[in-house]
Image (cartoon, coloured by chain):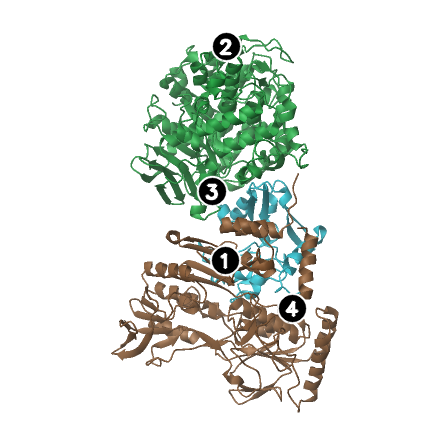
Amino acid sequence: MSWTRKVLRVNLTEGTCTPEPLNMEWAHDYLGQRGLATKYLVEETDPKVDPLSPGNKMIMATGPLTGTMASTGGRYSVITKGPLTGAIACSNSGGFIGNEFKNAGWDMIIFEGKSPKPVYLYIENDLTELRPADHLWGKSAWEADEMLHKDHQDPNLKIAVVGRPAEAGCLFAAIVNDLHRAAGRSGVGTVMASKNLKAVAVRGTLGIAAPENPDAFFEAVADGKEVLAENAVTGEGLPTYGTQVLMNVINSVGGLPAHNMRDVGFDKAENISGEAMHEPRASDGKPNLTTNGACFGCTIACGRISTIDKTHFSIKDQADKPQYQGASGGLEYEAAWSLGADTGVDDLDALTYVNFLCNEDAIDPITLGCTIAAAMELFEDGKITLEDTGGIDLRFGNAKALVEVIELTISGEGFGADIGQGSKRLCEKYGDPDLSMSVKGLEFPAYDPRGIQGIGLNYATSNRGACHVRGYTIASEVLGIPVKTDQNDAEGKPELVKAFQDATALVDSAGICLFTTFAWGMDNIAPQIDAACEGDWSVDKCLEAGERIWNMERMYNNAAGFTSDDDTLPKRLLKEAVKSGPTKGNVSRLGEMLPKYYEIRGWSDKGIPSSETISRLGL
Amino acid sequence: MSILNIIKKLFGRGETEPVQSSKPIQPEPAQTSKVASKKVESEKTVNNTESVKPEHNSSASASKSTEHQKTHHAIIGAGPCGVIAAETLRKANPTAEITLIGDEAEPPYSRMAIPYLLINNIGEEGTYLRQPTHYQEQNINYLSQPVTSINPDKSELSLADGSTLSYEKLLIAAGSYPVSPPIDGIDLPNVHSCWTLKDARQIASLAKEESNVVLMGAGFIGCIILEALVKRGVNLSVIEMEDRMVPRMLDEKAGGLLKKWCIEKGVNVLTSTKITAIEESGQAMVIETDNGESLSADLVISATGVRANTAFLQGSGIEVDHGIVVNNKLQTNIANIYAAGDVAQGKDFSTGDYEVQAIQPTATDHGRIAALNMAGQSVEHHGSVNMNVLDTLGLISHSFGLWMGVEGGDSVEIYNPDAYKYMNLRFGVGDEEDVLVGVSTLGVTQHIGVIRGLIESKIHLKEWKERLMQDPTRIMEAYLSSTQELDNVI
Amino acid sequence: MQKSLHLDPAKCTGCLQCEMACSYEKLGEFNPSRSLIKVFTFHEEGRFSPYTCTQCDEAWCMRTCPVDAITMDLTTGAMVVSENKCVGCKVCTIACPFGTINYVQETGKVAKCDLCGGDPECAKACPTEAIVFIDSNATGYDRMKAFAEKSLPSANAS
């Protein structure tokens, strides 16, 4: 049956935890996780609510395939209104906690209000209670995680937790679970901390009931796993190099932005690539990469587990901090790019270290890296001074400056507090708003819209701002999945973007990982959902549900005050041509693509879904 | 450490390990009979030869097994120890004559199962150690007849029905019996031990819903039947002389938590309390205690301890201390007589001392090793780890080895009274400062056996000791890291 | 030829497909907490270690069971717990020095790996061949097993 059909409603103001049945009517239209939780949020909150006020809600939600044997079926999402953007925020995470929620009997947990004092939510199956977290407040995510494990004396406890930046009001704080997996973007951690909720600790031992149609389910699941195993990306590239397999690939096709997107192409990309992580280092002959690790139920296992060179400047004087001396999660592609290529830093160990810091204190490395990159450009332009930075020489390529400024951001001190507001606010403060490489306030990931046209349209229209995992057209435009489209073409991209966005909305609502779509099409995914769940989940129904979810999110954002004017890209990407490399001379041709996109979406030229579209999708 | 090194190390230890004992080492059995029959004489010759042969000589053992095809092995005691011994003998020698002698009316059964019988989870047949037809299938003679005496000179047993039985080799696995304190009224008809199926039937007939039951003794046996009594709906009081529950297995903290747990479940627990008298009062009884309190009881269950069953050995010449004295082959001072299980004073793994452990895993280990030696193999008993597991109204406790610790050894505990969790790890000293020597736990169940593994293999935990000192719940990781070959992947 | 489960930590990614497969086979639900094979994570070392019963020859669990509830399946060589006979006394859980037979609160009985009657689901579910079911001799697994047992003085080759 795949849904547990139970929702836990946690009223932080009142300090109550109340079970309620899952709205199955909605489940049949929105499936689960991203779609279903957004439906709850849309129905229950005012889109104009201040994201950091008690009136905002935060939902942790699993999908129907979470906790099943469907490959990668361990995902959960955090849905709320994001403080960095003011738009709908939905951040997806792997690790092990998604399954734990499900095994404890909960499809989703709705947090509302604000606790008068720091608390954490403890869940042991039906036992659910808010407990004091004064002792955890002010601790890093890792420290709080360790303390909770110790308090409960249960190594099997799964924990999602915010770090110090979230408490201090950093707008791009994440929620880290299982030490190095995160609901990373849009500042969902900031919302959590604004509710005085430090952590969620859960242990589930109830079991998840058999799928609706077990024979069909296991057949579809086995087929799916075979497809993943035989695919070059999911069967070989990702296990071997992780997402970092992309660093050299994207660089070589002229799609890798660098230096706050001033440049396309990073000449030192090799030094921070997946391949570099395999190279033995001079000091101890060991490579940066220790092994690959999987999230719950994942047969791809792209996760990187790495160590920092013990002689590296970042940790050589920190022998008393075992958390940096052993193996931990990272480096993944997006973080390697934002913290590395975009800041011009090619020091793999420094990047591994700051990535550890991002996990340790639960902040989004993409926004962090991009904001620092913007600050570096402002610094080189003289708009940010040594006085502003507290003496940090914030030039591109300065690894030590990168480390220092990130340590400051985590503590929220000095210039770190400025960084903690994200690039949009930082660039406004220092007088050059155009240098913020963001859409709707969310910073770009590691693919340049000038070098790869379709992704630009996706960034501009993505419901949570500049986000690659809302419509990963890179799959088609660079990797040729499911078919190769020309990265330089604008034609056909609106259709491509819409197809990716709708399919992704469905995948994010199912409990599985988007990375499966390097190999899976909807004809691999739909049969798994259909066999697991009651109701009809044919390919068409799945795509329709995906489109419904996308439009629901759009309508929420419109109601929150966003307009078609916000469906744009920074001037730099529209006007400054790529200076060198394979995509030299290109700018983003968003203007050519956007009207067509609105049209095929069934939206007005102001980006508003037509009444026909609304009724067609049953919204 | 590579596997090779571990193996070398372990074999090294096996060869050189001194036999330690706080008592004088058992002399090899000497001739005790001047009028031994020829058969016994030859038996001893073989034994003497064996004692000078190198150990673990399996080819020699094999040839000996054939030589003794017709040996008659008698086993006194049909508990787990006796049954395992009989089966081991059968496996080692398909044609030997084997007689297993019990002294109760029922087929061999397990006392461990009695609590589950009392709550009707199983019927009496569920307590049987094996299907009753098993013995015949294995060609094991089963006699239900108390043994009244042993005459080693004649290699002969006297049975209660007046008959005799001669043997060539004898295993005494007669177990233990419950002892009751000398209290006025202890002989009253509604005062029972909880030891045999017969006791169980009587308890079942008296422990009815709402009846008042007093359990004398909160030791291992008392606690193990406590749940059954509560489930039967009686009003239960537990009276323990010592200052805590299960004092031989739990320290103050764990014993205290267990008491709190029982009280929360509605059991009246009195520790540091002695029963001074039991008096009849109409249909019921009145129990007087040394703290002045008196309780009414319809049934008193005496569970104040057990003692080795050695009375019938008087005059046999078999040396008895707290139990039957044995050497590291589980052989008594008489060459063709072995002793095992609750009745034997076998070697304790942790201390090297010879003592009566009276626990199930030791009984079965003893039974098997004694039988192998009887079958002509030469197998040394390296000592059994003293360990216990107890489920008291759903709260599970364990103790292993030197759970009270050793002087100067490190220890680490977690103590979470609200969650009823407790864990105490004890480490050795000197060369063994990173070796686990004892553990006690409350509220922990998963992978608990590795504690025996870690204690018994004396694995050096190295850096994992420090990690355990930080967080003892990581015991399974420590075990795996220390025992598996885990080379780096990439 | 008897087959054994061969567990290779170096190949394990910690995905827990084995735990789900095991629990589904035994309980008809996905419940890793009740799986009879467990994957342990060594965070500092970045390692994962799948772990279950080796069906050892010593069979401490079987020998110590007071009610004959554990028997050897003669076709697979697995020690199998009879749910009907097990009374839940837990003596086997302390006797097994590998910690691979566990008390299950939900059932009041113990549970251990029984090799799924000769076709273990964990091995089929493992995507990386960290768990394989192969001829015991082909892998030297018997030697490893023997080593594990010899490390315990109370184990005696008979």
Q: What kind of residue is marked 4?
A: Pro
* Element carrying mark 1: strand
Which sits in the foreground, A404 or A84? Answer: A404
Task: Count neighbours of disc 4 (C-alpha within 10 A) and say few if under 14, some if 14 to 19, many if 20 or more.
Answer: few
Between tags 4 and 2, which lies in front?
4
Q: What kind of residue is marked 1?
A: Val
Task: Count neighbours of disc 1 (C-alpha within 10 A) and say few if under 14, some if 14 to 19, many if 20 or more.
Answer: many
Between tags 3 and 4, which lies in front?
4
Measured from the top left, where is residue A43 in percent x and y?
34, 27
Q: Are marks 4 and 2 in one subunit?
A: no
Chain A colour is green
> Looking at the rendering, which quadrant does residue A104 occupy?
top left
Between tags 1 and 3, which lies in front?
3
Q: Are marks 4 and 1 in one subunit?
A: no
Which numbered disc covers residue A571?
2
- Give the residue at x 39% y 68%: B218
Which numbered disc covers residue A516?
none
- Image mark 1: chain: C
Chain C colour is cyan
The residue that mark 1 highlights is: C110
Give the chain ID for the brown colour: B
Measured from the top left, where is residue B286 in percent x and y?
27, 75
Between tags 4 and 1, which lies in front?
4
Q: Is residue B159 left or right of residue A4?
A: right
Q: Is residue B423 above or below residue A519?
A: below
The residue that mark 4 highlights is: B18
The residue that mark 3 highlights is: A146
Task: Count neighbours of disc 2 (C-alpha within 10 A) and say few if under 14, some if 14 to 19, many if 20 or more.
Answer: some
Q: What kind of residue is marked 3?
A: Glu
Q: Residue furthest bottom?
A: B35
Query: Is residue C88 at all visible to an observer of this figure?
Result: yes
